[in-house]
Amino acid sequence: MNERSWPVGGGEVGAMLRRWTGAETPLGPVSAWPVRLRSAVQVVLATPTPMVMFWGPSGLLFYNDAYAVIAGAKHPDILGCALHEAWPEVRDLHDEVMGTVFEGGQPLSFRDLPLVLHRNGAAEDVWLNVDYSPIFDDDGGGLGVLAVVTETTKLIHAQRERDAAEQALRRREQELAQVQKIGKVGGLEVDLRDGFRNTRSPEYLLVHGLPPEAAHETHEDWVRRIHPQERAMVESHFRESVAGSATDYQMEYRIIRPSDGAVRWISAVAQIERDGEGRPQRLVGAHIDVTERKETEAQLRLLMQELAHRVKNTLAMIQAIASQTLRGATSLEAANEAFTARLSALARAHDLLVGGARAHAAMADIAASVIGIQGDPTRFEIGGPEVVLGPRAALALTLVLHELATNAVKYGALSNESGLVALSWRIDEIDGVPHFRLRWQESGGPPVVPPTRRGFGSRLIQRTFTAAQGRADSAYLPAGLVFTLDAPLEALKDGEGEEPARARGSAG
C-alpha cells in the first residue's frame, strides 16, 4: 500500500492523512511509520465511536471524525500534535493517563468525568466517559494509549434539569401537603370500575382521624363514620351521583371522628371521570374540614336572631318611654328634654350591653354610667359584689338609675353643693334562693316632698319584673329619698325573653 492510498477510508481525517507530506509530525512520511502505528490508526479511523490515540512519550494525537466533533474548533490543528500542546487545560489528567497507562501499562476508566475544556475558544463545562488502554510492542513495552471517548454533557444537563424538576416537584408536593394540613384538606381517589376501591392521602387520614393503615379503607368504613342522622342521605346522594351522568360531586355532612369521637363537618368536592359511554371510571376529590365555618354560621344565625329580638325590645322600650314621657309632661319643652335624656340613658345602657359575649352587663359598669350623668364621682358612694345582669334587667335598671340621678340633680341630694348618694347592692339568700338587693339612698339635700303622681321609674319597673320576680319601693324620708329593689338573682340574669308584666311598688 503506497503513501497516497493509506489510510483506507477514514472520512475527513483519513483524507487529511493521505495529503500529509511528512513534515507535519516528527514521525516523518506516513509510509515510514511503524507498522503497529499504521495499523492502530487504521482501526481508529474505521471506528464510528469517538476514538483517539496518544502515540509515543509525547502522546502525538491521532483520532477519527467522531472524536473531531468532541475536539470542536481545535480540530484539525491538534491532529498530530503532542498531547499537552493540544489540551493544556487538562494537563493533570493527561499526566495521570500517561503515567498509569503508557508507562505503567494499566488501563484507566472514567464515567461522567467533569472537565473544563477550551475547545471552542472559551471555557466550557464538559462531561466525558473515557476508557484508556495501553498499546504494547512485542516485548510488552509501551507504544501509546488508545482512548474510547463518549461525551455525556447533554445527558448530564438533561439529568440535572430532570433532578431540578423532580426537586421542585417534591418541594411543591411538600408545600401542597403542608397547605392541605394547615387548611385541613385531604385528598382522595376512588376507583369506580368495579365497586369502590379507595385511596386516601395522609392529610385525609388526619382530617378524618384515621390511622395510616386506613389509607385503603372500604366504602363501608367511610359510611359508618358518617353521622347517623345524615348517613342514609349522604350515601344515597353519593351512589346516585356515581350511577348518573354527573361529573361534579359536592356534599357537606358530619362525621364522628374515630380518633377522639369529635363531630366534625366535612365539605366533599370531587370530579367523576367517565369513559366514552358515560360509565364511571374514577373519582378524584378533596375533603375539607369546615367545622369552624359551620360553627361560625350557626353563631351568626343566633346573633341575627338575638339582634332581631333586641331591636324589637328596644323599639318597644322607646315606644314606652315616649308614651310615658308625653303623658306626664307639663309642656313640649319639658317633654323634649325628658325624652332626649331618657334616650341618652338608653344609648348608654346599650353601650354597656354590646361589650359582653351575650349582651350582658356588669352592675359595677351600670353604676359607673350613672355617675356620668351627674359628673362628680365624689358625690357618690358606690359598692357591691360582682354581679352580671341580663339584657332586659340591665336596660331597665340603667334607665331607673338614670331617672333617680336626674331627679336627684333637679330636686334631691345632687341639687346642692353638699348632698350625697349612696348606691349599694348585695346578694342575700331567702329560702335558699339568691336575691339581688339594691339600695339608692340620698342625704344632705333639700327637704323631701313626695310626688303627687307615679313616675317613669315605677312604671318601668312594672314593665320589667312580675310581682313574683321582684319588688321595688321608694321611701320619701325627711333625710332623703330611699329607693330599694329586691328581686331573685335568676330573674335578673335570664329574664330577657319573658314578656314584661306589672309589679308592686313605686319608684321616682
Image: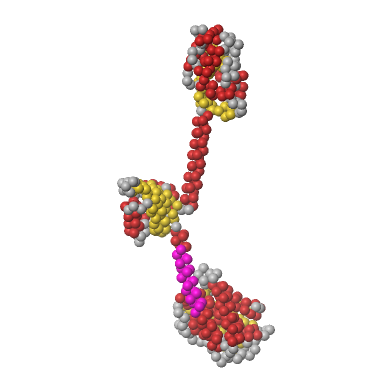
Q: How many marks?
A: 0
Q: Assess whether residue 466 is covered by the magenta stretch.
A: no
Q: Is residue 282 left or right of residue 119?
A: left
x and y, in percent, of residue 63 in the image = 53, 18
The secondary structure that dominates the magenta segment is helix
Q: Nearer the viewer, residue 43 or 17?
A: 17
Location of residue 243 with respect to 344 vertically, above or below: above
Q: Residue at x 52, y 80 (%)?
A: 318
x and y, in percent, of residue 283 in the image = 37, 49
x and y, in percent, of residue 157 in the image = 52, 33
Residue 123 visible in the picture:
yes
Q: Residue at x 57, y 21 (%)?
A: 75
Q: Nearer the viewer, residue 72 or 251?
A: 72
Location of residue 262 with respect to 141 vertically, above or below: below
Q: Which residues are magenta?
A: 297-316
Location of residue 108 with respect to 280 vertically, above or below: above
Q: Residue at x 51, y 87 (%)?
A: 505
Q: How is the image coloured?
A: secondary structure
x and y, in percent, of residue 21 in the image = 58, 10
Residue 474 visible in the picture:
no
Q: Is residue 500 left or right of residue 400?
A: left
> In the rendered image, which quarter is residue 256 located in?
bottom left
